[in-house]
Image: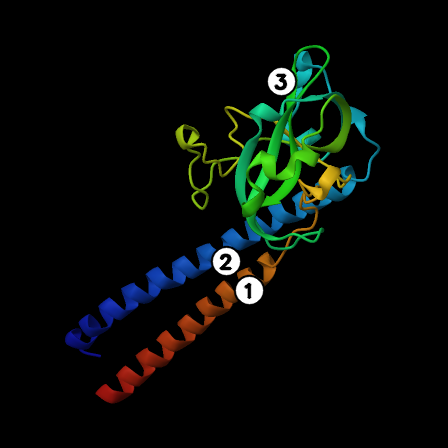
Amino acid sequence: MSGSSRRGLLLPTLATLVAFATLLALGSWQLERLSWKNDLIAQVEARAGQPPQPVLPASQWPSVTREVDEYQPVRATGTFDHAKETLIYTVLSDPKGPLKGPGFQVLTPLMLPDGSAILVNRGFVPEDRRAPETRRDGQIQGPVTVTGLLRMPEEASWFVPANDPAHNAWFRRDPAEIAAADADASANPGGLPQGGETRLSFPNRHLEYALTWYGLAVTLAGVYVAFVISRRRGLL
């Protein structure tokens, strides 16, 4: 093969190497995601079915961790402060109740007897029931006992808009501002908020995705080899 023909293969070779490395990296990333997802599923299955435990006193909250405590059933008694509820935008696509689509998670502070407070995700309301006056029956007054799953603050994500407190626009539980516990499926008066919408099953197709990326890498290698062979035969 002449020097000019070798130079003619240089650019396709470099492009193929970059694409091949990228495909392998994507496949390996999906395998890492598979390990993470399997750990999450095992964590949820091990904890969610346990008997609810009393919420720890505020002095012990710093010891609560995602690795040990998330999805642990908990129970707390207090009084809701409905005037300070926060609405977090969501799209409920796989509901357990009758309502779905765009709407809001209703997060309401539960004031505890010792003066501390926890934020309770009371459930889902559709967009047209955003205003509290449209669901007055669900604005429970007086002492109430709440049972639910302990949740840790949501981490920032490229795929979720930043919260905009100035315009009361919320898209995730901000780690700097909110510590949350999701309410269980116990019915609220009037049916809203629709509780029990905490996701306990998670799609797990990461192995399929990994095999797809690796398969594309193998296909790319085969195409490149066929390309080189055809070029060499054309020069004979």
Marks 2, 3: nearer the viewer:
3
Circle nearer the viewer, 3 or 1: 3
The quarter holding residue 138 reads: top right
Query: Split into 4 quadrants, where in the image is the C terminus?
Result: bottom left
Which residue ends up furthest to the left in the rendered image? Answer: 4
**Badge number at residue 211:** 1
Residue at left 63%, top 31%?
Answer: 66
Of marks 2 and 3, which one's residue comes earlier in the chain?
A: 2
Q: Residues within 10 Å of mark 2 (few under 14, many from 20)?
A: many
Q: Quadrant of residue 54?
A: top right
Q: In which quadrant will I find the N terminus?
A: bottom left
N-term mark: 2 or 1: 2
Name the spot of residue 181 as percent of width and height, x first.
Answer: 67, 30
| Residues at marks 2 and 1 touching, judged by CB atoms closer than 8 Å | yes
Gap between marks 2 and 1 measured at Cα: 7 Å
Apparent side of residue 11 relative to residue 219 in the rendered image (left or right): left
- Reading the image, the residue beneath label 2 is 27
| Residue 127 shown left or right of residue 73 in the figure | left
Residue drawn at point x = 28 percent, y = 87 percent: 233
Name the element at disc 2.
Answer: helix
- The three-letter code of the residue at mark 2 reads Gly
The relative height of residue 159 versus residue 120 in the rendered view (above or below) is: below
Q: Are marks 3 and 1 in contact (CB under 8 Å)?
A: no
Q: Which residue is mark 3?
A: 62
Q: Is residue 107 visible?
A: yes
Q: Nearer the viewer, residue 207 or 230?
A: 207
Q: Secondary structure at mark 3?
A: helix
Closest to the observer: 211 or 232?
A: 211
Label 1 sits on a secondary structure element that is helix
Say left or right for 7 vs 120: left
Farthest right residue? Answer: 51
The disc placed on residue 20 is: none
